[in-house]
Each structure stands twice: as C-alpha cells, then as structure tokens.
Image (spheres, grey):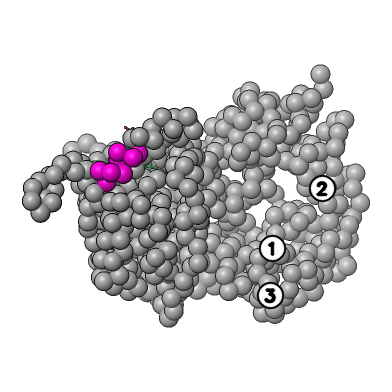
C-alpha cells in the first residue's frame, strides 16, 4: 500500500481574525481516526475543536499551544494510505479540510514543478453595493508574501476586512495607493508566484518546507526575491514596530480593540509576523501604560485598581491561568458594566396554563426528538414582544450620536459550558415555530458544549436571553450584551399562592428580570415590554395576535 503525506489546514472559522491554539490533543507518532479532535482553537467568540479529515499517523506538528492561526494555516502533517486520502465527506462543521487533490503518485516538491505566474489581486465582493476605502497597504513592491498574508485593508461603513495573498510569491506591481476608494473587481496589485497550485500542493502533498532556492521568479523591479517567510511562532516573531513608509499593520479585530481602548496603533510595538500588531501587543501596551500611570492611554475610567493581595499569607493557594474565553468574557462584562447605565425591571409570569400545554406536548416532543423546555416558549413570546417594541432591537451608534434600528429579530441565548459562557444566536426567532425554536436551542447548546460553534453562530444578536431556570435561583440582574440594549433573565419557576381578588390560587410563576440600557430605553418602555411579555406567557394565545 503506498503512503502519502497530507497537511491539515485550519478550516473556515467563520471569519475570525486569528484564533489561538489553546490545546494540542495529539503527538507525533499518534494514530488518529477520521473526525478525531486534533487541537482546540479559541477565537474571540468561541472555542472550536479541529477534527482530522482523514485517518492516519501524525508525522509532524506545525503548531504549538499559544500560536495564533487563521483560516488556511497548516496545522500538522499526516501520513496516510493513498486510498484513505480522499477528503472526508464534509460533516456538519467540517474542518481541517483540503481541496480534493489530483492523484499524486509520490510526495514531490511542488515548487519545482511550477513555472512563475503573475496573479492579479482584485478587490473581493465586500458584501455592500458600492465602493470601499482602501485604508492601508501592508506590503511594498518586492516584498515576499505567503498565501494568506494580509495585503491591504479595506473599510466600508460596516466593517473592515483584509485581503489576503491568494498565493505565495513576490509583490511585483502595485496598482493603487492608500486612501483611495476601490470597487469590487478592481485590480489592487500583482503577485508573481510559482503557480496557483503551489501552496495547496506544497501543503497537501508534502510536508517538506518549500525551499527558497527552488523559488526563483525574477521580479519586474529586478530585486531578488526574498525567501518566503518561514512559519513563525509568536515568541520567535519579534519584528520592528512599524514598517518604514507603511502605517501600522494589524487585522480588523486588533484595530477594533485599539479603537475601543483609544490607542493609536502607530505607538504600539508589534511582535507579530512581518511587523503585525497582535492583540497581545495591545494588552502589553495597556499594561505598560497602566504601570506607567496611564500616561499614553487616551481613555481611562479613573477607577482605582483593586490592590494586589498575597493570599498565600493566609493559607495554601494555587494559581492557574485563565482561558482566553474567560478573559474575553470578563473584559466584555466589565466593559458593558462600566459603559452602560443598567436598570433591571422584575416581574413574574403566570405560566400555569403554559406548563399544562407544554406537558401535554411531551409525547409529541419525544416523537420529534426534541426536548421542550420553557425556554422555547420564552423565546417565542420574547420575539413577538420584541417586534411590538422595536426599540429593544436597536443599538446606539459607536459615537453615541444616533440610534440604529434593526429590522430583524436575532436572539442570543447564553449557554453555560465547561469552557465558559458563550452566546449563540438564533436567527429570525420571530419567524420560527415552537418546534423549530426548541430544536435550535438543543442544537446550539450541544454545539456550544462540544466547542463546535463558529464565530458567525455568535454574531448579529439583537437581544439576549439568559436562563438559569434549569439550575435554580429566584432572580438575577443580567449584564447587557453590548451593543444590544436589553437582556432578559429567566429564573426557576415555582408554584406559589397567588391572590385572585377573592382567594389564593396555586399558580406556577416564572421569575423574569429585564436589564436595559437606560440611555436608549426608559422605564416606561421597559415596564410596557415586560408587562406585555408576562401577559403573553400568561396566555399564549396572545402569540397569535
Ligand atoms: N423553571 C423551571 N424549570 C426549568 C426552567 C425554569 N425556568 N427552565 C428549564 N427548566 C427545566 C427544564 O424543563 C428541564 O427539566 P427536565 O429535565 O425535567 O425536562 C431542566 O430544567 C433542565 O433544563 P436545561 O437547562 O437543560 O434546558 P433549557 O432549555 O432550560 O436551557 C440552556 C438551555 C442552553 C439555556 C441552558 O442549558 C443553559 O446553559 N443555561 C445557563 C445560561 C447561563 O449560564 N446564564 C447565565 C449567563 S450570565 O452569567
């Protein structure tokens, strides 16, 4: 049986701008099965396991914990029998996938087989209908680039995006300059590479590093091409802070974070590959600024820091680093808590009739393979009430000057997982049936716990529901998932005596609490919203109206 080598690449991770390797689950020499988890990646929004696309043996590990990876980055090389090298049929959330390769008899250094080729890099479809601004050019003529390296940064009014190099090669011509407006399809630059199949072939057929000696395209500038950059780990990647003649080099997520901190990227020291500023560099910059008296931070809360305490002075202690997800959740919570004036409104919904109805559907739910808990009803009622009170679907613009109304009703649902708190989003919740909502709650909660959520599963929410009903408690004050303006907390229903005007009745009461952003929602809005929700849950026929 002939053996071949194939490289597992980071799959589509939903547009995350770099995800950190938090755990490598295999070692060199390990035999792995198809779909066996190889490593765990954590992005800003989720942690994801990357499964093996084929069965085989791990030959070389190309990453280590702490590395930051983007889609398409090589992860490890596997040795596998040729007949098992067919790409695994895409499972749900297929990952680490490579494009089907033509039959290749033996590992051959693909570079030697390809002739130099010029590739025009064009403005991709940016999702909008007009021009976008080219805010940054990250390369200069003569630079060597690897497939996936950022070439330019485009910014529309909705998002900023990087255009990656489609192939390994050398930038041979630049057709644009920073600051101009460009349209989809417009040529940005030309890369002289060694054939569009190079990186794929090199990555999928052989684990041999691409030899710079075998890459010999001459560039129009006459400048000898530089060696393709080696894969760089963060620790080995120190580079000058700012490239001469080029403004700071950073991805959209880092730019966003810098904007939120009010930091000018130009003053941040970069440690990423090719002088790229990483999130860690911003963190380091903020730490240094705080230690140095916050002199270089343009924003500051002025809140005194909690003093450090030597806990070991009082008894035995142990210390373990927080996961990235835990740190991000903490930062999001603190940001919301400090920026948004929260008010929380409380009420109880009488769900006695709803519960009778829900329990009556038990057999039907089992037949459909769905678990029907109160949360599906709360989601459905909430979606209806949100549509009747659209201010709860709005967000303040980043500068606080306007209110953005959303004509869609995507509801986030907080899910408690061993890795931390995540909030997957149920899209168009107002258009789904009870069964569809119940099934989606189950599916998203399972994906969250199995670390299978992708960043885009967690984007676009307008309002959040956080239910501790399955766990317990009589009420809590949830923190708004900014830039949303409201969040509903659901606590544990309990049978209580309720006065009906003549006597006490035994009713099942569901405690609800609604936190809202008092910059956008006033008390009257919130009172009407929650009263309407309580009425709807008390008599679900209101959902028909
Ligand atoms: N009152 C009484 N019982 C409730 C209830 C409520 N409000 N909500 C759920 N239950 C019951 C369910 O019916 C189920 O009972 P059975 O097992 O007898 O059928 C049981 O509690 C467990 O429910 P569940 O929690 O598994 O399912 P769910 O659909 O209610 O919730 C999910 C799904 C994903 C929201 C939940 O699993 C979860 O992760 N909750 C935590 C969210 C969280 O962490 N919030 C805090 C964020 S802010 O720090």
Query: Which callout, 3 or 1, points at the residue further toward the start of the chain?
Result: 3
Query: Where are the magenta residues, as a range?
Result: 351-358
Q: Nearer the viewer, mark 3 or mark 1?
A: 3
Residue under pointer 3: 130
SS assignment at label 1: strand
The answer to whether residue 263 is left or right of residue 73 is left
Query: Which callout, 3 or 2, points at the residue further toward the start of the chain?
Result: 3
Q: Where does residue 165 sit, x and y in percent of width and height?
A: 73, 58
Q: Where does residue 37 sit, x and y in percent of width and height?
A: 57, 32
- Picture residue at 35% right of the left edge, 62% below the top: 486
Number of marks drawn: 3
Q: Is residue 341 above or below residue 382?
A: below
- Which residue occupies the extreme top position in the image? 1
Q: Where does residue 86 sit, x and y in percent of width and height?
A: 76, 31
Classify the position of ligand 1 by quadrant: top left, top right, bottom left or bottom right.
top left
Q: Which mark identifies residue 198?
A: 2
Mark 3 and mark 2: span between their CA atoms? 33 Å
Q: Nearer the viewer, mark 3 or mark 2?
A: 3
SS assignment at label 3: loop
Proximity of marks 1 and 2: CB atoms separated by less than 8 Å: no
- Neighbours of disc 2 within 10 Å: few (<14), some (14-19), many (20+): many
Q: Is residue 134 above or below residue 429?
A: below
- Picture residue at 70% right of the left edge, 78% below the top: 181
Query: Which callout, 1 or 2, points at the residue further toward the start of the chain?
Result: 1
Q: Which mark identifies residue 23?
A: none
Q: Magenta stretch: residue 354 in it?
A: yes
């Amino acid at each position: 049986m002939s053996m071949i080598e194939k490289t597992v690449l980071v799959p589509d991770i939903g547009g995350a701008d770099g995800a950190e390797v938090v755990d490598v689950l295999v070692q060199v020499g390990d035999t792995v099965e198809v779909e066996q988890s190889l490593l765990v990646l954590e992005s800003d929004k989720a942690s994801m396991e990357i499964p093996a696309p084929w069965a085989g043996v791990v030959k070389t590990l190309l990453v280590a914990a702490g590395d930051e990876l983007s889609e398409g980055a090589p992860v490890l090389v596997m040795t596998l029998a040729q007949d098992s090298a067919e790409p695994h049929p895409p499972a749900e959330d297929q990952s680490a996938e490579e494009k089907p390769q033509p039959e290749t008899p033996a590992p051959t250094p693909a570079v030697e087989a390809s002739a130099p080729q010029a590739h025009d890099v064009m403005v991709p479809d940016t999702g909008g209908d007009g021009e976008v601004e080219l805010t940054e050019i990250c390369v200069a003529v003569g630079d060597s680039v690897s497939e996936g390296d950022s070439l330019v940064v485009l910014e529309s009014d909705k998002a900023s995006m990087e255009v990656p190099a489609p192939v390994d090669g050398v930038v041979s011509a630049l057709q644009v300059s920073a600051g101009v407006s460009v349209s989809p399809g417009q040529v940005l630059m030309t890369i002289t590479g060694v054939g569009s199949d190079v990186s794929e072939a090199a990555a999928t057929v052989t684990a041999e590093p691409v030899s710079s000696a075998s890459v010999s395209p001459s560039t129009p500038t006459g400048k000898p091409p530089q060696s393709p950059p080696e894969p760089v780990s963060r620790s080995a990647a120190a580079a000058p802070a700012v490239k001469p003649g080029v403004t700071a080099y950073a991805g959209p997520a880092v730019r966003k974070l810098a904007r939120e901190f009010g930091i000018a990227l130009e003053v941040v020291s970069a440690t990423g590959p090719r002088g790229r500023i990483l999130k860690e560099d911003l963190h380091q910059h903020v730490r240094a600024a705080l230690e140095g008296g916050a002199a270089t931070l343009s924003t500051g809360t002025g809140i005194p820091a909690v003093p450090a305490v030597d806990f070991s002075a009082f008894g035995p202690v142990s210390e373990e680093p927080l996961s990235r997800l835990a740190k991000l959740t903490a930062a999001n919570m603190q940001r919301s808590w400090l920026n948004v004036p929260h008010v929380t409104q409380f009420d109880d919904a009488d769900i006695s009739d709803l519960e009778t109805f829900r329990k009556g559907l038990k057999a039907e739910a089992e037949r459909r393979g769905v678990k029907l808990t109160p949360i599906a009803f709360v989601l459905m009622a909430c979606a209806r009430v949100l549509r009747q009170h659209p201010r709860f679907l709005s967000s303040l613009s980043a500068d606080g000057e306007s209110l953005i109304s959303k004509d869609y009703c995507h509801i986030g649902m907080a899910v408690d997982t061993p890795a931390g708190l995540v909030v997957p989003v149920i899209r168009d919740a107002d258009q789904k049936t009870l069964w569809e909502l119940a099934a989606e709650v189950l599916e998203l909660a399972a994906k969250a716990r199995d670390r299978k959520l992708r960043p885009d599963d967690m984007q676009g929410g307008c309002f959040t529901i956080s239910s501790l009903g399955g766990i317990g408690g009589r009420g809590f004050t949830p923190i708004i998932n900014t830039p949303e303006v409201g969040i509903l907390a659901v606590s544990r229903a309990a049978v209580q005596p309720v006065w009906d005007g003549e006597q006490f009745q035994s009713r099942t009461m569901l405690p609800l609490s609604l936190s809202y952003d008092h910059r956008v929602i006033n008390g009257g809005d919130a009172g009407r919203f929650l009263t309407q929700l309580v009425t709807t849950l008390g008599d679900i026929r209101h959902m028909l109206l």
